[in-house]
Each structure stands twice: as structure tokens, then as C-alpha cells.
Image: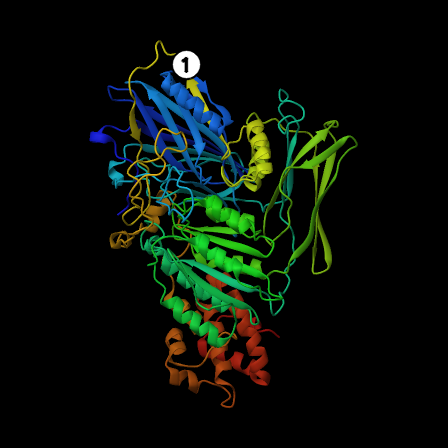
Amino acid sequence: MVHPGGLLTPREKPVPLKSISVTLSICEFVAGVSATLNYKNEEEVPLEAFFIFPMDEDSAVYSFEAMVDGKKIKAELQDKMTAHTNYENAIIRGHQAFLLEEDMCSRDVFCCNVGNLLPGSQAELTLKYVQELPLEADGALRYVLPAILNPRYQLSGCSEDSCLNMKTPVVSLEDLPYTISMVATISSQHGIDRIQSNCSLSPIEYLGDNKTSAQVSLADGHKFDRDVEFLIYYRAVHTPSVVVEMGESTTKSDGVLGDPAAMVTFYPNIPEAQPSIACGEFIFLMDCSGSMQSPISKQSKSQLRIDVAKETLILLLKSLPLGCYFNIYEFGSTYEAFFPNSVKYAQSTVEEALRRVKLMRANLRGTEILTALQHIYKQPSVPGHPLQVFVFTDGEVTDTFTVVREVKSHRLRHRCFSFGIGEGVSTSLVKGIARASRGTSEFITGKERMQAKALRALKRSLQPVVDDVSLSWDLPDGLSAKMLSPEQTVLFRGQRLILYAQLTGTMPPAEATGEVCLKYTLQGESLENKVTFSLQPKLDANLTIHRLAAKSFLQTKDMGLRETAAGDKKDVLKVSMECGVISSHTAFIAVNKDLNKPIQGPLAPRDVPRPMLMYAAPVMQSLSPPRCGTGRRTHLGLGHRKEKKCTSLSEARLEKPKSRASAKKTNVETHGPVVEDNRLVELISLQKADGSWDLNEGLALVLGMKLEDIQAALPDKDANSSSWATVLAVLWLHDNAKDMACEWELLERKAVAWIHIHAGSVRHELVKAAVAFMKSSADPAIFGP
């Protein structure tokens, strides 16, 4: 059962939030979003309402306004403590007041306060934000509107000043008192190939001769049982570009908004290079907290999070190169390492690791990821083997800033590749730890395959290091570029790179051009990518590029209200206030002083229920819920418990899948196979650390043949039976799992290398006989010349 959570209104009083309407505009790879919260007080007393909701941590929120009974009130961005004081004073004086702020502990959670809502009064609160859209491996751009906010675990020793530390009684989805609607417009000069979603949509309407734009809306009746997700495929391959945006003429000249800003997009053409034999120390940090026992999503036949994570971990283990070192940690309320220290990759250590992986359960209660990371960082380094940490978690931690700060403090000795599993995962945690350590982050929802994304990250971790990354500008005299993005120190093959710069000085005539050059070194070879661009700035009333530039800066410097260094806090406040982009140190406040008379008497508090995708009892927390730092409620309540108790939900797995025709009718397409091929998992489990397979009953079962028939087909009785078995296994992969080749590419590479060494002069004979025996359609050239 799916449990939305939040505070139930006393005595079954109606909740003032009635609906949420979202307008989405996507142009190329930037999304602009306007979300309106519609409130109405149907009671006979004035109300103060509180609503907590998730946001993607990459969102640059730049506008907040209220429409109260037909009157528009524009909010002002202020220092957070000042905003709290002004809000309190307004409430005390009986004025209407509205407050929007980031959570104290995580930048992917927001709290909206509506104060002094009169009986019968209506209020529309609109917030606007812009966001870069991440690029998927298959070229899709992904947009996610977070709708799920799960209970999050309070780390030991961390502050409890979070909006999430609130009592969350269970409310069925059917009883959720508000609805959501969404209209999306998508445009690209290159044309749109297709749009996919995990939700039911209205028929997609394409516009333009080359399908350069499209309009679509969320179907009526959407339940808050999943995040709303779009995958957008454009017709043209993504190409490097530079867009120059005009500044705001009314802004003071020494500020960021006063000058034009440039958004530079590169797709570095980094050649594929073979990694060295001994190439790293790999630590796999596996979340075994209770919530990992939940299905990844509510969709039909969705696997449990822990089961998908275990299968992925087995695949990663089998794909590691010979000569490396590794260890595995499982964590929850406590943590435990498989080995006292990282061990060398060998058959015996891999067998022991596999044995323990198969015994893993989601039974370690809470999510003490911080203490597990601190232990990893205290371990001695393996000389000559750079540390690579892979984190698998459902991301349900309250104080993400503390975790990100810990990772950032060790960024020079490791990279972190993070994976957020399931709906409602904390984007602040998963993206934050990857960004802080120069790694990458991935999210797995719906029916997506984690394995493909994990292998992509592993391939990146195995890439030779790209050194001496620099950006140079060739601009007309009198014009210079000041970088607003943090210094780029790492590049990955197949990665998109977005950088921001402020153009200062005298802008040249309209026909003038500039050039920007990305330079880097790979294995001693100097490489560069250049883009020539027009210096004619484009007008954008929303100052989208300036806002995104500010967000890029804030994500690097802003470590939370308590964690940010004093010097950085000054810069964060300056950029946040000047560019109008919210941070952990600022908040939007709007006050309506134009009432006929101030409201008299106490306000009735109403906390809006929020949806959570949980298949278990939610976290029990303080009986006196805090409200994000406004000082009007106690932040430290009694009865706080740290455990996330979860039970599996069998009825979610019994849900009937939609037919292909039904999915097509509603424009819903799934993102991958529904169920794992058990034979593929078993075949991978049988592979040895050196890349070979033994000829035994287990392999025969996977191949669907009798062992004696396989043995009898061996063309040369003096040949090594393992060579024969390994050739057969590789052919099976090509014949039966070709569409998942990106997942087994690395372990196949090991297998072919092993065959070259051990099959000797009979290799070609073995391959020819195996192709005939298996009736394989695979090209024998896969085994090399």
C-alpha cells in the first residue's frame, strides 16, 4: 500500500491546499517551470497552512508571488533569518504573509507557509524555477517533477532543524485532498523524435513542419504514487554550442545580472583508451536499510530495491579488471565491511564476496551513511590504485549537507559514483556526493535497469585520467570572460559539459563572433574542442542563463545554513540576493498589508498532507512538529525514533501490467525490460574472476543443454574444457542478451582475453565448432583475428 504522509488536520477539518498546477516549458536542454499552489480557506476561522514538498536539487528557484482574492503580491528574496523575523512580525500584526524556503538540511526539500488566510479567502502561490536537463546514455533528456517525499532518516549527532522532522500519519492516496495538473511545451530547432513518460498523458500534439515543438499534458486523475518523468529524444545528435544572454540594464554594473552571460555546452570527443591492468581500488557501499525492501516503483512486477542492487553488484564484481583491489560495505543503522581491508581481485576473494552478497538483506533499519563513509576514508590507501567509491542508496537521509561536506573534504583522494534507487530518492544526496568528488550520479526508477547505468559508471571509473583541463576564450578587444562555473578538473568520455561565464567590457557590433576552446590532456596527448559563436546577446525576460549560472555557483559554495564556511557564506548571500535565486541562506517572503483591518485572534494551524511512496509504516517522529526555523514551534520534540520500518507489499507486485496497446494509447512507454533474465544473472554468477567459465552442470542449465552433449561436441578432446565452456558462454551472450550488451561488455572483454591466452592454437577450431553447435548467429570475429 502507498502511504502519503503529513499532518492530518484536527477534527477532520478540510485541508486548505486544493490543487497544484504546473506549466512546463522545455527548450533544447533547459526546462522552465511555473508551479501554482491553489489554497482556499473553507473554515470559519483564519488559518496558517504549511506545505512541504520535494524539488530536484538542480532547480534554480527565482520567483515567488501570491495572488490573494485578485491582488498580486510579489515576494522579496531576503536573508533567511531576516525573512523569518519579518514573517513572524507580519503574523503578529495580523497581516497576511507567505514564506518559501529551502529546508535547513537538504536543498531538495522546500517549505511553504501561508499565514492569515481569511475565512472564504483564496490564494494562489506561484513559484518559478529553471533547470538543466540531464543527458541519458541513449541521448534522451530527462525531466522529473518530484511528487514523492519519503520519510528520511535523521543522522546521529546531526541537527533536527528539518522540515521533515514532522509527525506523518498514514493517509491513503484516495483521501489526498488536492490534485495535480501539468501542461508541457517542448521545442527544439532540430526537431523532436519522440517523447516518453512513466505517466498517462493526453495525446501528444506535434507542431511545425519538422516537429520542432510539441504540446502534451498529464492525464486527469494522476495519483501521487510516482514522480512525473519525461524522456525527450531530439532528431539531431547533440552538438557543442554557446548561447549569449543579454543582461538586465537596470542592475548595477558590477553585478552578475548587469552583464551578458554565456552558456557553453561541450560534448568532449574523448577517444576510447584501454585502462591499465592494475587500475584502482573499488569500494561498493550498499544501503541495506529497511526501506530498501520496498519495490523500486508501484508499477507492475517492479523488483525490490535490494534485489536489483544485489544483481547489479554481482555484475560489477564480475566486470572488475584483474589486478585491482576491492571491498564491499553494507550499511544501515550500523555498517560492516566484507573484508578488514580492501583485498586483491582473485577467484577466492570474489567467491567470498559473492557468497555474502547473496545473503544480503534489507534488515539494517536506519541509514547511517555518514559513519560508513567516515570509516572508508580512514582506511589506508592502496599505493598505485586510486580510490573509486560506488554508493547504492534510496537516499532517505535528512541532513544531506553534512554527508556532502564529508565527501567533499576527501575529494582529492577519491571519486564517488552514486546511484539513487526508487521514487522519492534525495536528489540532494545522490547528486551532491557525486558532484563534490568529481564523479557521476544516476537515478533508477520505474522499470529502468540499474545494471546498464552501473556499468556506464564503472567504465568511466576505468578511463584513464584526463589532465590539464582548461578553457580559453578568443574575444574582440575590450571584451573578456569571467568564469562563473567552478573549475573543471575531470572529464568523462560521452559526458556533456556545461559551463557559464560573465562577459564584461564593451560588446562589439552584432556581426562579431567569439571562440571558446576546451583543452585537455589524455595519456600524454593534447586534445581540444573549439566552438565559434555569435556575440549578439539574446533577450530573455526570465534571465534563464544568468539564473542557471548563479545556481551552478551556489551548488559549489553553499553547504547549508550551518555547514557553509564564513567566506563562502558571504559570496553565497551576494550571488543569491543579486540574481534572485534562492539558497539555504535566503528565503522568499511576501506580505499583504492592505487588509481593511488586521486579523484578530489566534490562527488555526493546518499542515497539508504530502505524498510518499512507501510500502511500509512511515518514520515516527516528534509529536510537536518543527516548522523550518521560524521559531514558532519547538524543533526538538519527544518520541523521535531513528528506525525506518518497512515491510514488503505483495499487492504492488500483483498489479496487472498494461497491454502494449494500452500503453501506446496513453503515450506511456516503459524504459526497459520488466523482469530480469534469470539465466543471464546465473551465467554472470558462474563466470570466474579471470574471465573464464568451467564446464559443469550450472553452465549446461543456462545453455539449456545436457552436460554430456556439450562434452561430446568438444572438437578436440585434448583441448581445455574451460576454453570450450568460455567460448560457448560468450556466444550465448551474443545470441540471447545482445540488447543488454552494454551490461556484459566488460566481462566479455575479460573472457575473450582469457581465451586468447589459454585456447592456444585450437582457438579458431573451438570457435567454429561452437558456432555450429549452438546454431549461433554471432560473428566469429568477436573472438578476434
Q: Residue furthest right?
A: 477
Nearer-the-camera pick, 195 or 126? 126
- Whether residue 624 sits left or right of residue 668 in the image: it is left
Asked if one can make out residue 189 in the rendered structure from this viewpoint, the answer is: no
Per the image, label 1 sits on a secondary structure element best described as loop
Q: Disc 1 marks which amino acid?
A: Lys
Q: Residue furthest bottom?
A: 718
- Whether residue 10 sits left or right of residue 237 in the image: it is left
Disc 1: which residue:
593
In the image, residue 782 lies at what x, y percent?
Answer: 56, 71
Nearer-the-camera pick, 593 or 87? 87
Q: Residue furthest top?
A: 596
In the image, residue 155 lies at what x, y percent?
Answer: 41, 48
Rendering quarter of residue 111? top left
Asked if one can make out residue 743 in the rendered structure from this viewpoint, the answer is: yes
- Does 762 sit above or below residue 113? below
Identified at 49% across, 72% down, the residue is 730
In the image, residue 425 lies at what x, y percent?
Answer: 41, 47
Image quarter (top left, top right, bottom left or bottom right) of the C terminus: bottom right
- Does 108 sit above or below residue 688? above
- Does 342 sit above or below residue 67? below
